[in-house]
Amino acid sequence: MAERVLIIGAGIIGATTALALAERGYRVSVIDRADTVAAGTSGANGAQLSYSYTDAMASPKMLRQLKKVFLGRDPAMLLSSRFNSKLTGWGMRFLRNCTQSRSDSNTLAVLKLAIESRAIMHDWQYRYQFSFNQRPAGKLHLYRQVPDLEDAALRVALKNTYGVQQKLLLWDEAIAIEPMLEHVAGELAGVVYSPIDEVGDAASFTVAALEQVKALGGDIQLGMSVNGFVRQGKTCTAVKTSVGDIEADIIVICAGFDTARLSRMLGVSLPIFPVAGYSLTCPATPETPSVSITDMSRKFVLCCLGDSVRIAGLADLGRVAGQPSAVRIDALLQTARERFPLAADYNGEIHPWMGTRPMTPDSRPIVRSCGARNVYVNCGHGMLGWTLAAATADSLRWLVELEHGTWEMTGSWA
Ligand SMILES: Cc1cc2nc3c(=O)[nH]c(=O)nc-3n(C[C@H](O)[C@H](O)[C@H](O)COP(=O)(O)OP(=O)(O)OC[C@H]3O[C@@H](n4cnc5c(N)ncnc54)[C@H](O)[C@@H]3O)c2cc1C
């Protein structure tokens, strides 16, 4: 009989993990404390399937920028005082990752995952035809400062050596790709084009993937919060929830930022730090760019999703999502309006949103066992959870099959 896998979290990571395991014949149950799926950070993120922009957050450039952040002079990044003590341990590890060599190796490790993700997503798309406003839109990164563009050029060269297409464009070349750039306000130093990047709505994908899990025999239970684990020796036999214990053979924690708290209950400390961000979804206009745009100086993205425009950005270090702060939402709105005045109907109905990026110090997600022989985590995807979800789901599925599968190794590897 197939083993029962219980997945905690019905966000994009829980949904893709559930799908990868259900496809291999596991009996999958997904539970979530919210009353709807994708109620957390997968709800209204930037919608970027950023297959070639995987640059690690910790870098020499970030090191130079930190002074401005600590002095509260960076409009895109804000340090929440509440989390300063927790930032210390995580921050030391982050600083150790700010060397050029570590930054490059973290960027390339995530790039490898992103390319794997793209292949799996295309395969799922071919087989299931999920509807999530997916488009191979390509992406243009706009740089307003020459030193930032020079830095980006080094990363482009690094990725090119690994066969990933990204290129520097002259302004008229960028306009040929996206004529709506004519309306962008302010001086630009240059543009990086990433033709293989795509856009798609993570929440719609989460819903569709979980429907497919159900079609493969799985079930989804909402409105139940996990608050502990039942252990017998080295095994967890059940999770304790707000509506009683649920038994399982294998447990996978995909609870976003809350994975850190749940793992501590199993004696495991994970380096996950909350970085809140915001988005606005507004009606599109005839001048909305069809290529996805990232404004690197203010660190926000803008893309067309069906008949809407999604604008997302800002980073509040140490902050966990709650009610979106009116001041930060207003800052995002004002910046987008100023820089891209015609790209969205800013006077139409606007849906503000806030989510928590679960960041690791090296920007690499964490897929591993966790404090018991049958418990795993798939978490810490930070800024790129939507992009990396399919690859980390596949890595987790591999791990489970290696440790709990019934197949045997033969031949020279045995
Ligand atoms: C502003 C912003 C823009 C972003 N843009 C992009 C982008 O363009 N591209 C990209 O690749 N990534 C982007 N990201 C990152 C991406 O959204 C996240 O990495 C990803 O959504 C994380 O998914 P998750 O499933 O781990 O977490 P979540 O979506 O938060 O899911 C975790 C789920 O676990 C549930 N849960 C938590 N604790 C418990 C518990 N104790 N019991 C039961 N259930 C529990 C929660 O209710 C939640 O539904 C962005 C993030 C932000 C904030």
Image (spheres, rainbow, N blue to C red):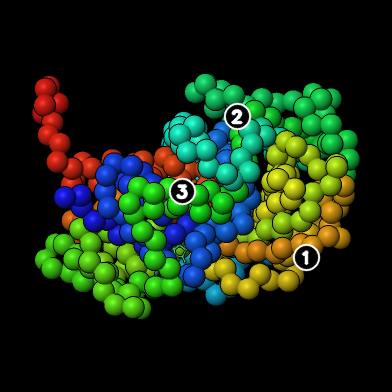
Residue 61, image quadrant: top right
Frontmost of labels 1 and 3 is 3
User: Of helix, strand and loop, which one carries label 3?
Assistant: helix
Tell me, yes or no, if residue 68 can be seen here. no
For marks 1 and 3, give the CA distance.
33 Å
Q: Name the image quarter holding the C terminus.
A: top left
Frontmost of labels 3 and 2 is 3
| Residue labelled with disc 2 | 196
| Residue labelled with disc 1 | 330
**Amino acid type, residue under disc 3 in the picture:** Ala
> Label 2: how many residues lie within 10 Å, few (<14), some (14-19) or many (20+)?
some
Expressed as whole percent of the image width and height from the top left, the position of residue 104 reads: 49, 35
Expressed as whole percent of the image width and height from the top left, the position of residue 39 reads: 53, 64
Mark number, residue 209: 3
- Kindly identify the residue that appears in the image at 69 percent across and 46 percent down: 305
> Label 3: how many residues lie within 10 Å, few (<14), some (14-19) or many (20+)?
many
- Kindly identify the residue that appears in the image at 62 percent across and 60 percent down: 277
For marks 1 and 2, give the CA distance.
32 Å
Of callouts 3 and 2, the N-terminal one: 2
Q: How many marks?
A: 3
